[in-house]
Image: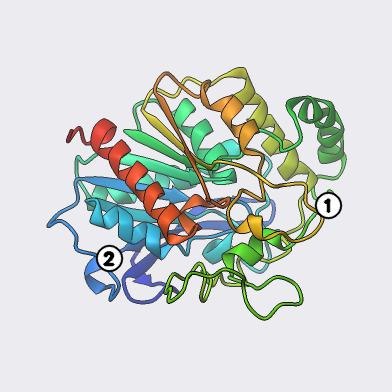
């Protein structure tokens, strides 16, 4: 029987291990994290009982450590949960290849398992699925294939298209597919830098002791301590990309390009601009998406479903809810308005 245990985030968080179908590397698990605001010293004022629930899905080279997101959802009246997918974060085991998967539909196992636990915790309240970056691609595809299972979908900088262009994805797919069939775990060399990690960890520019133009007297972690991701689960220079994993991503993006038919309301949050081709650090990378081309995301948004809202946030980084305080508060307001208007129907 699955049980809740103390989580690495400390007071206010518990976790549950969810066994999944084993694969060719051996036993596989996912980890469900639950926010318990009454035990969190930093919790905001919350309603007496939740009126909706949120399940958050992380992106590539990532895991759940978003305390501010959990607190904002709880303050808005939501029960907050997150999942570390198989072979990521809390779910990664010593015998496994980091993040490795050959078909994005396999993630239906952990999403289904998480939803069953949430349903047992909270009977008959609306459910919102939330996905960031690669998690945004995964959750969009899942919502398209599972009509009626959720009441809303929130996508935070979803990886809906290859950064370069649709034509490059189309030309590269046959080559990647061939490599994936012949040697699925072959590493695919991709450009990598630590620019995004610098923004997440409040790291000064190269050769400098301090970040320039920090607001006077700020206590915002974005400027002071950074968000302190665990280096065991989020590596500054990224993780090796495997051929079969990339083939699965390209297949999923091709499905998005063909058009989805998500029937629940969808909210897409992105930065208002990108800076993805820089060869050296620029301070503007603390205020733009330095991972994905947001214009490529915008091209796909209208084809996700019949009810889609796009919010472009000036000053946001790739994970918009880890941006500076003023920007992430705008993101939380957008989420709150979306849920009240289209999920709980409180307006």
At x 40%, y 41%, the residue is 129
Residue position marked by numbered label 2 in the rendering: 36
Quarter the N terminus occupies: bottom left
Q: Is residue 56 left or right of residue 163?
A: left
Q: In the picture shown, does residue 2 fall above or below 310? A: below
For marks 2 and 1, the one nearer the N-term is 2
Residue position marked by numbered label 1 in the rendering: 187
The one nearer the camera, 102 or 199, is 199
Query: Could you tell me if residue 197 is visible in this image?
Result: yes
Q: Indicate the quadrant where residue 292 lies.
A: top right
Q: Are marks 2 and 1 in contact (CB under 8 Å)?
A: no
Q: In the picture shown, does residue 330 fall above or below 48? A: above
Of helix, strand and loop, which one carries label 1?
Answer: loop
The one nearer the camera, 13 or 325, is 325
Marks 2 and 1, how far apart at CA: 40 Å
Query: Could you tell me if residue 150 is visible in this image?
Result: no
Task: State the image coordinates of residue 66 (x, y, percent, origin top left).
Answer: 44, 62
């Amino acid at each position: 029987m699955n049980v809740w245990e103390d989580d690495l985030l400390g007071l206010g968080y518990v976790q549950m291990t969810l066994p999944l179908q084993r694969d060719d590397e051996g036993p596989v698990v996912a980890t469900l994290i639950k926010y318990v605001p009454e035990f969190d010293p930093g919790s905001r004022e919350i309603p007496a009982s939740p009126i909706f629930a949120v399940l958050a899905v992380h992106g590539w080279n990532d895991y759940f450590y978003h305390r501010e997101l959990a607190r904002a959802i709880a303050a808005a009246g939501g029960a907050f949960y997150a999942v570390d997918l198989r072979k990521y974060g809390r779910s990664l085991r010593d015998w496994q290849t980091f993040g490795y998967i050959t078909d994005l539909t396999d993630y239906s196992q952990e999403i289904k398992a998480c939803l069953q636990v949430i349903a047992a915790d909270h009977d008959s309240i609306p459910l919102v699925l939330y996905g960031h970056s690669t998690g945004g691609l995964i959750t969009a595809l899942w919502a398209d294939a599972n009509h009626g299972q959720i009441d809303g979908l929130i996508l935070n900088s979803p990886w809906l298209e290859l950064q370069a262009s649709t034509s490059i994805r189309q030309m590269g797919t046959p080559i990647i597919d061939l490599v994936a069939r012949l040697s699925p775990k072959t590493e695919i060399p991709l450009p990598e830098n630590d620019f995004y990690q610098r923004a997440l960890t409040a790291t000064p520019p190269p050769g400098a002791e301090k970040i320039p133009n920090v607001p006077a007297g700020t206590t915002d972690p974005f400027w002071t301590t950074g968000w302190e991701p665990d280096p065991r689960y989020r590596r500054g220079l990224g993780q090796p990309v495997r051929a079969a994993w990339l083939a699965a991503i390209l297949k999923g993006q091709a499905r998005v390009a063909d058009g989805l038919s998500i029937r629940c309301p969808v909210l897409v949050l992105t930065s208002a601009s990108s800076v993805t081709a820089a060869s050296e650090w620029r301070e503007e990378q603390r205020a733009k998406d330095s991972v994905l081309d947001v214009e490529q995301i915008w091209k796909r948004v209208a084809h996700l479903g019949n009810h889609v809202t796009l919010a472009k946030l000036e000053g946001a980084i790739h994970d918009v809810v880890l941006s500076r305080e003023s920007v992430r508060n705008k993101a939380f307001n957008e989420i709150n308005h979306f849920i009240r208007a289209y999920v709980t129907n409180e307006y």
